[in-house]
């Protein structure tokens, strides 16, 4: 398996996504998915999917539908970098060429609610020019 990581500006990212879409007929890409685990548990953070509850340090965290779905998607794919487009299409269930601000706003709000310090996130990491990943190695430290 070969992994290619690029650092792109927004215009380059859109061009790469169009190329990726065109290549998808010829190249098999790894699908992202929500793993049907009833509880996702990380240091200081627990996601109880069967109850649609998120607990931080044992206390309930109130999340919107989009925040909750984004968190579950990222936490179900720890360490995997997901583009804004992948997150948008999986959570909003629609295609979009202008999903950037929607995903950024949800990630920002989510960090304010679950991160010990939203300015120095431990769970949801930004991969500049690419997207976001859930980093369980440093979670809760």
Image (tube, grey):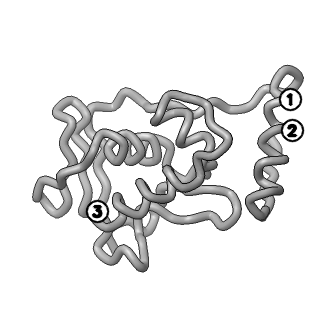
Q: Place residue 65 in its image quadrant.
A: top left
* Residue 112: quarter of image: bottom left
Q: Closer to the camera, 15 or 74? A: 15
Answer whether labels 2 and 3 touch (C-beta < 8 Å): no
The N terminus lies in which quarter of the figure?
A: top right
Q: How far, Cα to Cα, is label 2 from label 3?
A: 35 Å
Q: Do the residues under discs 2 and 1 have CB atoms within 8 angstroms? A: yes
Residue 47 in percent (x, y) is at 26, 45
Picture quarter with the C terminus: bottom left
Asked whether residue 20 is in view, the answer is yes
Residue denoted by label 1: 22
Query: Which residue appears at 18% of the width and 42% of the height?
Result: 53
Q: Earlier in the sequence, mark 2 or mark 3?
A: 2
Which of discs 3 and 1 lies nearer the camera? The answer is: 1
Q: Position of residue 88 (x, y in %)?
A: 54, 40
Q: Can residue 82 be seen by looking at this rendering?
A: no
Residue 19 numbered tag: 2
Is 106 situated above or below 141?
above
Residue named by callout 3: 114
As drawn, 78 above or below 35 = below
Q: Residue at x 89, y 23 (%)?
A: 26
**43 on left or right of 128:** left
| Foreground disc of the pair 2, 3 | 2
On the image, the x and y values in percent for residue 45 come to: 26, 57
Q: Residue at x 79, y 26 (%)?
A: 28
Q: Are marks 3 and 1 in contact (CB under 8 Å)?
A: no
Q: In which quadrant of the rendered view does residue 123 lie?
A: bottom left
Residue closest to the far front: 98
């Amino acid at each position: 398996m070969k992994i290619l990581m690029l650092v792109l500006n927004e215009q380059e990212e859109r061009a790469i996504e169009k190329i990726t879409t065109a290549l998808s007929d010829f190249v098999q890409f790894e699908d992202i998915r929500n793993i049907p685990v009833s509880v996702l548990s990380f240091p200081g953070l627990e996601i109880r999917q069967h109850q649609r509850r998120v607990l931080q340090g044992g206390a309930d965290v109130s999340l919107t539908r989009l925040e909750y779905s984004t968190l579950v998607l990222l936490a179900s794919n720890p360490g995997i970098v997901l583009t804004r487009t992948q997150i948008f299409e999986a959570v909003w269930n629609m295609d979009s060429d202008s999903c950037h601000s929607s995903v950024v706003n949800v990630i920002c709000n989510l960090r304010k609610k679950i991160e010990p310090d939203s300015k120095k996130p431990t769970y949801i990491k930004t991969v500049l020019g690419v997207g976001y990943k859930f980093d369980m190695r440093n979670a809760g430290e």
